[in-house]
Image: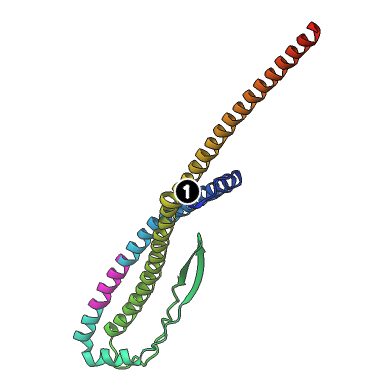
Amino acid sequence: MAGQISPTRSAMLASKASLKTAQSGADLLKRKRDALIGEFFALVKDALAAREELSGVSKGAYTSLFGAKAWDSPEAVESLSLAGSGDYAIDMQIDNLYGVKVPRIEIPERDTATTFSPINVGARTIQAATDFGGVMDGIVKVAATETKLRRIGEEIKKTSRRVNALEQVLIPGIQDDIRFIRSVLDQREREASFTLKKIKAKLEADAKREKENMQAGHHGSAAD
């Protein structure tokens, strides 16, 4: 970059201002990244807990399903599954977390009232249906936490790349420009100082000769 910049005092001031802005930007991005990392690790615990909860309710639900099929017959279980409602509405809001848009999903309250006639349906089949409702809740909770986790992780990577670009490319480049401009200005100042000394010495020498000539001329007039 040094070869593309004009080594002037105005360029020096502009480069120093750019350096300050870049360093401030890097500091802000690092603070954002650190905050996001804190949120990420806190959310990892929630995601693992949601996964563990889903695993637990799934095992219980499949146990209930096997029992229902054994006691109430597979046909009764299949009939119940076809009779149930397929609607499952969720309430999703978008939160802004340090500039990252993440979903916030509210688990809907399930209606415990039966949407089918319980005649010829055993208690185990009804229990299996209830347990699989819990599985659906668990899936939604896992999806919500892991989607949020993924977006925060992507933002951490993006922020880290921006910090690296500033600290490893932009800031060193500006610092090189400043060093280049300073070296040229210092060289010019040394050359100007040397030139001024030569001019001063020449002027002093001229003044001295002129004084000597005047004194010589004065003595010559006095001798006449």
Between 27 and 67, which is closer to the camera in this rendering? Answer: 27
Image point 42% across, 82% down: which residue?
88
Q: Does 168 sit above or below residue 198?
A: below
- Work out whether residue 57 or residue 188 is closer to the camera in this orientation and state it: 188
Q: Is residue 150 left or right of residue 175?
A: left
The residue furthest front is: 224
Is residue 129 visible to the viewer in this orientation of the structure?
A: yes
Chief SS of the magenta region? helix
Residue 31 in sight = no
Which one is nearer the viewer's eye here, 127 or 158? 158
What is the quadrant of residue 150 in the picture?
Answer: bottom left
Q: Residue furthest top?
A: 223
In the picture of the structure, the residue carrying the numbered disc 1 is: 2
**Magenta region, residue range:** 52-63
For residue 117, what is the image quadrant? bottom left
Residue 214's spot in the image, x, y percent?
A: 75, 16
- Residue 176 position within the rendered picture, expressed as x and y whole percent measured from the top left: 46, 45
